[in-house]
Image (cartoon, rainbow, N blue to C red):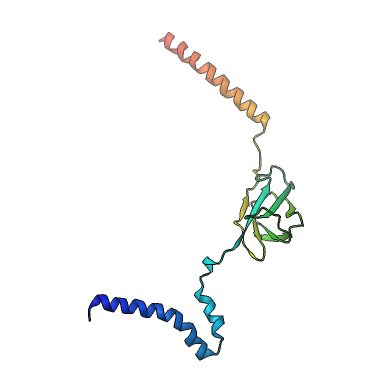
Amino acid sequence: MNKRLLSVILILLGILLIFIEPYLFSVITGVPFWFLSLKLVPLSIIPEKQLMVEVNPVVPINLGELITVKVLDAQNGTTIEGAIVKILKDGLNFNVTTQIDGIAKFEYPGATTIIFVSKDGYRDADPVVIPKIPDEWVTVKNYQVITWIVTLLASWAPAFYIYKKRKE
């Protein structure tokens, strides 16, 4: 038998086996064939609704600041009531449910926080990460002092260099 014909037969047998296998399993186990044949439809071709998540503020600056999570239908922009907003921080988690306006609120705990959003009939939204607030912020006052020192050094450095060159 030629190799090409053999490979075609093997491919056809493989394809046929995909459709026959649920039927054979159904006969052996007694599980209804219609239930087993569901696996013939890849889930990737069934359209899924998607969630869109808006977090405000994205980077909070104060401990205990109110974080607002708004959950929308990605296709038409309508708010989603009853979505589960799972907040994970330091290994602990708690859930908040969105209200009729699609909004869930919680106080920022100060640590790195991961937000997961899910709703029946929708694909889970991508997680949102809120970073940990730094132990110390560079304030405007500190920034002004740093700027003053840099300006002073930048203005005196060329004068000092010229002075040294003239001395030589």
> Residue at position x 61%, y 22% from top?
148
Residue 106 position, x and y percent, is 74, 53
- Say if 147 sits above or below 30 in the image: above
- Say if 144 sits above or below 31 in the image: above
Residue 129 position, x and y percent, is 62, 51
> Residue at position x 54%, y 84% from top?
33
Question: Which residue is nearer to you in this view: 154 or 88?
Answer: 88
Question: Which residue is nearer to you in this view: 58 or 148?
Answer: 58
Q: How many marks?
A: 0
Does residue 25 show up? yes
> Residue at position x 73%, y 61% from top?
82
Residue 9 position, x and y percent, is 32, 79
Residue 34 position, x and y percent, is 55, 82
Indicate the quadrant where residue 152 lies: top right
Residue 101 relative to residue 12: left or right: right
> Residue at position x 72%, y 61% from top?
95
Name the residue furthest top: 166
Quarter of the picture holding the N terminus: bottom left
- Say if 40 sits above or below 153 in the image: below
Quarter of the picture holding the C terminus: top left
Question: Which residue is nearer to you in this view: 125 or 65?
Answer: 125
Name the residue furthest right: 100
Does residue 108 show up? no
Name the residue furthest left: 2
